[in-house]
Image (spheres, rainbow, N blue to C red):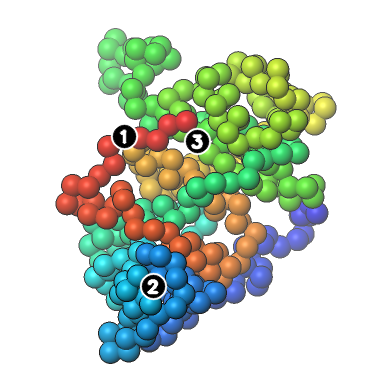
């Protein structure tokens, strides 16, 4: 249903507030331990090494020993919080703060809120972003919108006009410039916006990158809405296309538009300019996916989002990119479509 002018925005309603940060701050150590255990293993404790559910309880150490492989593990073993050095309720508070933000949270703000070093907050925030990455997602169908936006491409003009160059030319552009591609499946109920959002990173908005992106995430027979960019011309051979010329109109006479894709980029830009300020190309795919996750959960309460994120953090394996990050274990190449 469309929201009329006199209706209250969802984020201002009581439905959007189903838990408080104070609920997490007041947790005792045992309560925090129990909360994470239930979030990680809702169907019962399982060995992170062999997934066996029969084990011995070592009460003095608050650990389990698997009856199958004899592996000894704790509530955080094999998760992104494995070998943690901070109290568990500090990590739960980090998840609560992270979940409560509509436009993301910078590592600097997280370090201030938790009173931890910036290095700790940086790795922690990236581990939470890593938990939001879905390894496999169902392909989009029915009605889908596609669009792209460029980041990291600003070239500052020279002070004196005589020294300025044409920044539209390729040789004068920043080599770190990247295109963020987005696909958004429209909700089946008119007026409820996008239903599922998928993102990818490319060096440019080209036919090759668009074809690879669409082939991976869109079902054949889907109706795709796109703007007038030449990068989408090749899609006409495989999909029913609806095009809108944004230099003339926002919505075509036939109803074609990319408003839901633009809505994603609106949130993405607010996260970039208002929170993080700078996206490194190495982890640009993580930032884009985080914005997609926040857009897809925009009508869920903060309690539901917190429960989902803590469950994802518990299910995520040990991070191969951020475990030992400040000791030199860093990602070597960016992720491109």
Q: From the viewer's perspective, tell me whether residue 271 is left or right of residue 66.
A: right
Mark 1 to mark 3 CA distance (whole Å): 15 Å
Location of mark 2 (residue)? 68
Against 164, is 217 above or below?
A: below
Looking at the image, is mark 2 or mark 1 earlier in the sequence? 2
- Residue corresponding to mark 1: 333
- The answer to whether 215 is drawn above or below residue 25 in the figure is above
Could you say where residue 19 lies in the image, as x and y percent from the top left? Answer: 55, 75
How far apart are labels 3 and 2 at the CA level?
Answer: 41 Å
Residue at 65% across, 59% down? 299
Location of residue 187 with respect to 214 vertically, above or below: below
- Under circle 2, the secondary element is loop
Task: Kindly identify the residue that appears in the image at 17 percent across and 51 percent down.
Answer: 327
Q: Are marks 3 and 2 in contact (CB under 8 Å)?
A: no
Q: Residue 33: x percent and y percent?
A: 39, 80
Q: Which residue is mark 3?
A: 200
Marks 3, 2: nearer the viewer: 2
Residue found farthest to the bottom = 60
User: Viewer-proximal residue, 265 or 83?
Assistant: 83
């Amino acid at each position: 249903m469309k929201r009329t002018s006199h209706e209250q925005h969802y984020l201002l309603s009581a439905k959007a507030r189903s838990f408080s940060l104070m609920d997490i701050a007041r947790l005792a150590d045992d309560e925090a331990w129990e909360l994470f255990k239930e979030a990680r293993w809702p169907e019962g404790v399982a060995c992170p090494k062999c997934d066996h559910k029969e084990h011995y309880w070592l009460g003095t150490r608050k650990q389990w020993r698997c009856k199958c492989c004899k592996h000894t593990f704790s509530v955080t073993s094999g998760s992104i919080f494995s070998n943690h050095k901070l109290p568990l309720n500090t990590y739960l508070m980090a998840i609560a703060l992270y979940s409560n933000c509509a436009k993301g949270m910078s590592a600097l703000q997280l370090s201030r809120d938790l009173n931890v070093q910036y290095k700790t907050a940086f790795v922690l925030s990236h581990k939470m972003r890593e938990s939001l990455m879905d390894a496999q997602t169902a392909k989009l169908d029915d009605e889908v919108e596609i669009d792209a936006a460029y980041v990291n491409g600003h070239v500052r003009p020279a002070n004196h006009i005589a020294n300025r160059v044409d920044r539209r030319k390729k040789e004068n552009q920043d080599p770190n410039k990247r295109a963020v591609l987005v696909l958004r499946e429209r909700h089946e109920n008119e007026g409820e916006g996008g239903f599922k959002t998928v993102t990818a990173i490319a060096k440019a908005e080209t036919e090759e990158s668009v074809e690879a992106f669409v082939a991976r995430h869109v079902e054949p027979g889907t109706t795709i809405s796109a703007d007038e960019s030449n990068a989408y011309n090749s899609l006409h051979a495989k999909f029913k296309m609806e095009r809108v010329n944004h230099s003339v109109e926002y919505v075509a006479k036939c109803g074609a538009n990319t408003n839901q894709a633009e809505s994603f980029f609106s949130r993405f830009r607010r996260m970039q300019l208002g929170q993080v300020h700078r996206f490194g190309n190495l982890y640009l795919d993580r930032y884009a996916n985080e914005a997609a996750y926040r857009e897809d959960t925009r009508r869920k309460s903060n309690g539901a989002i917190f429960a989902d994120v803590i469950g994802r953090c518990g299910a995520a394996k040990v991070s191969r990119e951020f475990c030992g990050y400040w000791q030199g274990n860093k990602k070597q190449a960016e992720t491109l479509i």
